[in-house]
Amino acid sequence: MMQRDFFGELLAIIAKDRAEWSTPELIDEGVAAILADNPTDDVAVLAAGVVAQAGREEERRLKFSTATLDALCVIYLRESLDEVGLHHLNRGIGNLLVDNEAQRIALLEHDAALDKIMANISSQDEDLAHSSISVLINLVMDFPRGQQKVVEKKGIPLLLKRIENGTLTRPRALQLLSVLVQNEYACDKLVSLSGIDLLLDCLPAFLAEPDENLEHAIEILETASENGIVQKRLYARQVHLVLLEEMEKLVNQEINVDDDDYTPILDACLKVVVNMTHNDEVVKGMITEKATLGKFRGWMTYPGSILSGKAEDLVMCACLCIGNLARSDKNAASLVNDHQFAKYLLQVLNDCKSLKVQFATLSALRHMCIPAENKAYLGHLSVLEAVIPYLKSPTPDVVLTSTVILRHLSSEDRNMRAVIYSNSGDGTALSAALEATEKHADTPAIQCEVGRLLAILIKTAAKSNAIDPLTKVCSNLAPVWNLLTLPYPTVYGEAVLALSLAFAHYPTPSDIAVPESLATAAPELFQPTLPAAVRANAAQLLLVVQTVHPEWAGRFDDVAQAALGNLPQEAVEMDTTIYDQLTTVLGKIVAHAASE
């Protein structure tokens, strides 16, 4: 269709003597003036067409003030305008809204005009309905106030009706809905109006003929699948199986045509399936599905050449989902012992060079390392040795997750010794973890996890009365002492216990260096919010420190006095044994200081 010359027609009607309107700036200025002068319908429509054309260029679009939009909104309310006129006014209004918050705010102030635009979504005139939806897309894009307003004006049911009717405006309706559901209120509305079921009813047809309808529908499901109710609804309809098949089909098509341009549909499908596995009720069902677990197993066992190439999104999806399925100890034990997924994860870790897949794999292994019944077996599979190279990664999240794996496994005696002594060619796991604290000195989470790793190594060694391993760990206790200075009170108990065990079992306790930071950290160890048992152990540690190191005598006097002063008000709630222990040890600290 030939594009109309709106400006030429406009000049032909009212501006034959305005030949000086030869530049875009003068055109835009003149059209804005015409709109502000209460023009006739014909002139207003032509002027709106000029605004729409000018609005395609950012530089020209930004020269129109909100007064131009105000004028278009006033004209929009005229009952004399037909569908064609309203369509062109929509185009003018819509283009002014693009990336312009001031114009968007101005439209929100024209409530009646916005109501009429909303109503025109239901117009039988396809062009008018299409342009009305386009106005709203430009209004709500990255603009929460606009999203909220459209939802409040019952935009969701209007769009669902448009989608259900299967008209030519369906793609635009789906696109608008995909933006609106980013608003939590809109997502709730979509669920309450059975919009998810409508999309799922349409999904087979969209999958049969993939186009923008499918892309927008999957985008909607991607956002909505963060909602717990939606997750359960998707599972009830077995959507994950449909999407897993679609993902595999998309990847196979790309492999066959050697096309590296991954479709956004694949990424959205992945996120929907992974989001579903965040729901505990969904996980209960999915963990028993042979088809689902079989699909994940198949993706993890692709040949190495595939793992590092086009199928990596499938592998990552499988690893992320298995990791989420393994969040409970029971499931983690089943996935390791009944389904052998630890072996498959290690295969991926060895074969795949993609950082995102490696991280997903490590995350899944982290969950599998938690149950006590898995620890010895995973150590036997050489998980510890496989993780060592990732402790040297420049990526903090990879280092952090690898350290957590070591910490979980180190509560088992054989694994504890492997962490300390086994050398894979990259050094021991312990040495690699200590190096990580230096390389990532600005990442508190890594400092914390390495300290916790050393703490559990000490605890396991002490429990087994393994003096040599304990002595090896105690040669560098700085990360454990450092735990007491970090803003993570929940780990103070681990640090205090480990340090107390170190002093109790180390052959020459006086050789254990005490950092100056303990003086600053000591008051934090007696916060009333900390468990009483932790405070009791902390008091015992301070007493040991000033006993073993006479130079520390008296340095905890004020801390002990303050802690003693706070105890009486806790006497009723605190366990009697711990209360007596805490009172006694704090008293000894003060008495010891006085005797010195």
Image: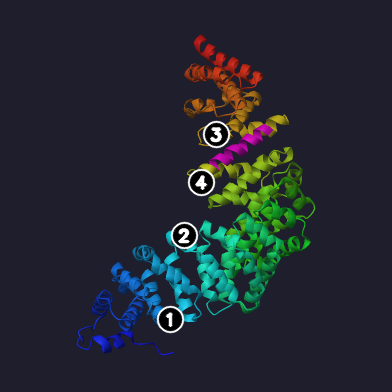
The residue nearer to you, when weighing 93 against 227, is: 93
The residue under label 3 is which amino acid type? Pro
In this figure, which residue is indicated by the disc labeled 3?
489
Where is residue 79 shown, x and y percent of the image? Answer: 38, 77
Cα distance in 3D space between marks 2 and 1? 27 Å
Q: Are marks 2 and 4 in contact (CB under 8 Å)?
A: no
- Location of the N terminus by quadrant is bottom left
Task: Between label 4 and label 1, give the one nearer the viewer.
Answer: 1
Check if residue 455 falls in the magenta segment: yes
Residue positioned 69% across, 34% down in the render: 460
Cα distance in 3D space between marks 3 and 2? 40 Å
Where disc 3 sits, the SS reads helix
In this figure, which residue is indicated by the disc labeled 4?
439
The circle drawn on residue 83 is 1
525 versus 486 height, above or below: above
Where is residue 576 shown, x and y percent of the image? Answer: 65, 18
Cα distance in 3D space between marks 3 and 1? 66 Å
Where is residue 288 shown, x and y percent of the image? Answer: 77, 56
Left or right? Give the position of 29 relative to 185. Answer: left
Start-end of magenta stretch:
446-459
Which of pointers 2 and 4 lies earlier in the amino acid sequence?
2
Residue 122 visible in the displayed image: yes
Which of pointers 3 and 2 lies earlier in the amino acid sequence?
2
